[in-house]
Amino acid sequence: MSDQTNHPRIAFIGCGNMGASLIGGLVTSGYPANRITAADPDPEKRTVMVNRHGIAAYDDNATACAGAAAVVLAVKPQVLRETLQPLAARLRGSDTVIISVAAGIDSAAIDRWLGGNAAVVRAMPNTPALIGAGATGLFANDQVSSRQKQLADTIMQAGGLTLWLTDESLIDAVTAISGSGPAYFFFFIEALEHAGIELGLTAEQARQLALQTAFGAARMAHESDVDAAALRERVTSPGGTTEQALKQLSDGGLENLIQQAATAARDRARELAATLGGES
Ligand SMILES: NC(=O)C1=CN([C@@H]2O[C@H](COP(=O)(O)OP(=O)(O)OC[C@H]3O[C@@H](n4cnc5c(N)ncnc54)[C@H](O)[C@@H]3O)[C@@H](O)[C@H]2O)C=CC1
Ligand SMILES: O=C(O)[C@@H]1CCC=N1
């Protein structure tokens, strides 16, 4: 089989945090760098793509898209429409699957901006894709063929777990849980570090302990055959220290706060769709 069949050409539009993470994950997984192209107006971003990942990077989106079986849109939702419109004529009627990672913007808006009848996959990945530890929720519109769905899955699976949804609106829930989720955990690590410093550890000691604890807990939860609640209970000796700490978190309303945070993220995705993805 030719490389064209085994490794269809993939183009990335936007090489910022998310685009670069996906490209990094794909190259590290063994996808040939010469089958990946990228575009970004920022010369520094392009230099990173060329030097670190060995892929071709252009300042012109159309050049990057030429001959691509999949185009991954990794620009901000606020510029998605203006980015897509100049590409519409080139992509219309082609066999290219459009994979958008933009928060909020739904497949109908993308289809409309492309002039209709476009094969659109919405994907919501997260930045740990860079190290193959990401999680992506995906939705395909009716125009997407099974071969195109497979290609979208291959691209996202290079970055970690993939999860297909049949209800597009749930992509906003994925955004709230795993798309934005790494930031919640990083915030927790930062807070634990600060607490360690307050209790007298050096910044470096607090950093090492907080990081290794987050890593160990996540790895254990991932690999264990019991759920997170059971693992938590194993740390929590009756009458012991953890119990006192968890009581503070619980009394402070942590669980409610997390629910509110996820709902706020989900609602912001809906708001982006309403303000940027409308018919006007
Ligand atoms: N950062 C994250 O953790 C996640 C981001 N996303 C989505 O990924 C998309 C990108 O977000 P980030 O990477 O965080 O933003 P970013 O600002 O880091 O990257 C966007 C990139 O697009 C480039 N760009 C701007 N206009 C362009 C154009 N017309 N053509 C080509 N490239 C252009 C910018 O120079 C920049 O490098 C957003 O739609 C966001 O909703 C989705 C999941 C997670
Ligand atoms: O904050 C954002 O809007 C993007 C989408 C999910 C993670 N980052």
Image: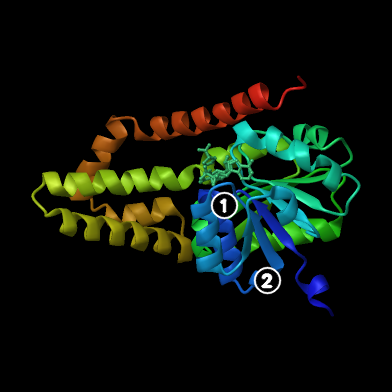
Q: Can the viewer see residue 31? A: no
The amino acid type found where label 2 is placed reads Asn
- Residue at left offset 56%, top offset 31%: 266
Alpha carbons under labels 2 and 1: distance apart: 16 Å
Left-right relation of 40 to 185: right
* For residue 71, above or below residue 110: below
Mark 1 surroundings within 10 Å by alpha-carbon count, few (fewer than 14), some (14 through 19), many (20 or more): many
Q: Going 42% across and 35% down the picture, which residue do you hit?
A: 258
Query: 139 and 26: which one is in front?
Result: 26
Q: Which mark is residue 34?
A: 2
**Residue at position x 62%, y 74% from top?**
30
* Front-most of residues 196 and 42: 42
Please name the amino acid that badge 1 sits on: Cys
Image coordinates for residue 233, horizontal then vertical, percent = 33, 52
- For residue 66, the mark is none
**Residue receiving disc 1:** 15
Query: Is 41 situated left or right of 3 in this image?
Result: left
Task: Please tell me in which quadrant of the rendered image residue 245 appears.
Answer: top left
- Residue behind label 1 places its C-beta within 8 angstroms of ligand 1: yes
The x, y position of residue 256, in whole percent, is: 41, 30
Identify whether 144 is placed above or below 219: above
Quarter of the N terminus within the rendering: bottom right
Pointers 2 and 1 in contact (CB under 8 A)?
A: no
At horizontal 76% and vertical 48% (from top left) the residue drawn is: 98
Res 167 → quadrant: top right
Task: Point out residue 135 in the picture as x, y percentages from the top left corner.
Answer: 57, 54
Vertical arrangement, residue 112 with respect to residue 217, above or below: above
At label 2, counting other C-alpha atoms closer than 10 Å, the crowd grade (few under 14, some 14-19, many 20 or more) is: some
The scheme the figure's colours follow is rainbow
Give left or right: position of 21 versus 255: right
Q: Looking at this rendering, what residue extends furthest in the bottom direction?
A: 1
Q: Quadrant of residue 100?
A: top right
